[in-house]
Image (cartoon, rainbow, N blue to C red):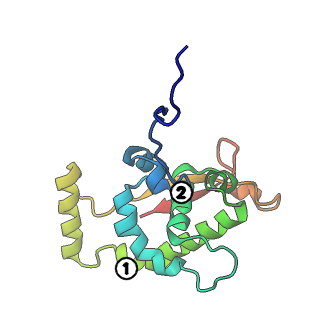
Amino acid sequence: MELIDTEDAYIKLPKRYIQDYSNPFEFFYEKAFKKRFKFSKEAIMYYILPIIEDNLAKNSNRGLPVSPILQLLMALRFYATGNYQAVTGDLRGFSQPTVCRCIKAVSTAFAEKLHEYVQFPKTLEGQQNNIKKFYEIAEFPNVAACIDGTLINIVNPSKVIGEIFRTRKGSFSLNILVI
């Protein structure tokens, strides 16, 4: 039997790539990221986050503040899936109350910026411009604006007012409309 000199012998291990699993930007490829958050990485980093980042930044050092980008991603994931807040939090390692606060902060930040970015044309010229654009994009004639809606499932708020939120299928939800 031949002896091997231990100084010359070595085992080649496959190269390991370290990923930050807590950072969705590094963990998900572009297609998977867009499937989960409904926006591209570029759109979130360079367009959406800068709009609301100042509203999400904490002014105190108390506790472990959640970064604005993670707050935004948790809210977008919640909006995209409609999962319970606890499920959304479990995916990133946050508690349900933390997810709730993040969703509220992001939603409030969007609501505060709404009038800067979403406006119905006030002049006849602006409405005609919208009609022209709708026709160019989808050949919709005489359309100046759109409305869309969705039902967001909720737990029965109370026996007294719960029936207001009951759907035709027997579940409870909020009817959200967007113009």
Work out whether mark 2 precedes mark 1 in sequence or the reverse, and give the earlier one: 2
Residue located beneath label 2 in the image: 79
Q: Which mark is residue 170?
A: none
Dot 1: what SS?
helix
In the image shown, does 77 or 108 lie closer to the viewer? Answer: 77
Residue at image mark 1: 116
Q: How many marks?
A: 2
Q: Which quarter of the rendered picture does the C terminus lie within?
A: bottom left
Query: Would you say residue 51 is visible in this rendering?
Result: yes
Q: Nearer the viewer, residue 137 or 39?
A: 39
Residue found at the very far top of the displayed protein: 1
> Residue placed at 45% from the left, 75% from the top?
52
Residue 40: x and y in percent read 37, 55
Q: Nearer the viewer, residue 109 or 142?
A: 109
Residue 141 quadrant: bottom left
Residue 118 vs 8, above or below: the answer is: below
Which residue is found at the position 83% from the left and 57% from the top?
159
Q: Residue 156 at what x, y percent from top left?
A: 76, 55
Question: In terms of image quadrants, where is residue 121?
Answer: bottom left
Question: For this view, does 9 lie left or right of residue 134?
Answer: right
Q: Residues within 10 Å of mark 1 (few under 14, many from 20)?
A: few
Residue drawn where x is 67% and y is 52% of the image: 90
Where is residue 170? Give x, y as percent.
70, 43
The secondary element bearing badge 2 is classed as helix
Q: Position of residue 24 (x, y in %)?
A: 49, 54
Residues at marks 2 and 1, CA–CA distance in whole angstroms: 21 Å
Question: Looking at the image, do the residues carrying marks 2 and 1 touch, with CB atoms under 8 Å apart?
Answer: no
Q: Nearer the viewer, residue 100 or 170?
A: 100
| Quadrant of the drawing holding the N terminus | top right
Q: Could you tell me the amino acid type at mark 1? A: Glu
Please, what is the three-letter code of the amino acid marked with disc 2?
A: Tyr
Is any atom of residue 141 visible in this view? no
